[in-house]
Amino acid sequence: LSLDERIYVKMRNERELRGRLHAYDQHLNMIMGDVEETVTTVEIDEETYEEIYKSTKRNIPMLFVRGDGVILVSPPMRTGT
């Protein structure tokens, strides 16, 4: 992990974070800035029993991330071509 670089963090409970890494420790507790959080929820349609995926995004200026919820840390994923 490099400080002040953008990272992608996959969390428990279908949460994803993209932002700038300011600090971290041996437990993967992190302080991130300019974070975009994406939360994906799954609902079941009562008539057709189909899964409906909904994504909610929000921007957070500064965030403390507990390391016990972290699944994956990587450089941000490229989108587009």
Image: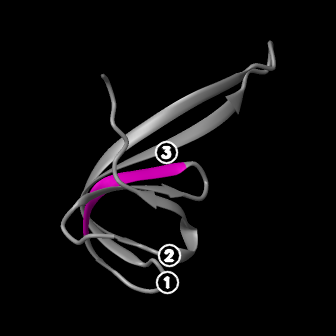
Task: Tell me whether the residue at label 1 lies in contact with that at label 2, contact meaning CB atoms closer than 8 angstroms.
Answer: yes
Residue at the image point whose x is 49% and y is 45% from the top:
39
User: Disc 2 on helix, strand or loop?
Assistant: helix
Around disc 2, counting alpha carbons within 10 Å, would you say few (fewer than 14), some (14 to 19), or many (20 or more)?
some
Q: Amino acid at mark 3?
A: Val
Which of labels 2 and 3 is toward the front? 2
> What is the span of residues highlighted in magenta in the rendered image?
15-21
Dot 1 or dot 3, earlier in sequence: 1
Residue 59 at x, y percent in the picture: 27, 49
Q: Amino acid at mark 2?
A: Gly
Residue at the image point whose x is 31% and y is 24% from the top:
80
Q: Is residue 67 above or below residue 56?
A: below
Q: Which image quadrant: the C terminus?
A: top left
Q: Is residue 29 above or below residue 38?
A: below
**Which residue in the protein does label 3 denote?**
39
Please indicate whether residue 69 sits to the left or right of residue 42 in the image.
Answer: left
Dot 2 or dot 3, earlier in sequence: 3
> Cα distance, mark 2 to mark 3?
18 Å
**Which residue in the protein does label 1 denote?**
27
**Which residue in the protein does label 2 denote?**
67
Which of labels 1 and 3 is toward the front? 1
Residue 17 at x, y percent in the picture: 39, 53
Which of these two is toward me, 25 or 32? Answer: 25
Around disc 1, counting alpha carbons within 10 Å, would you say few (fewer than 14), some (14 to 19), or many (20 or more)?
few
> Cα distance, mark 1 to mark 2?
5 Å
Residue 58 at x, y percent in the picture: 33, 45
Q: Which image quadrant: the N terminus?
A: bottom left
Q: Which mark is residue 44?
A: none
Q: Amino acid at mark 1?
A: His
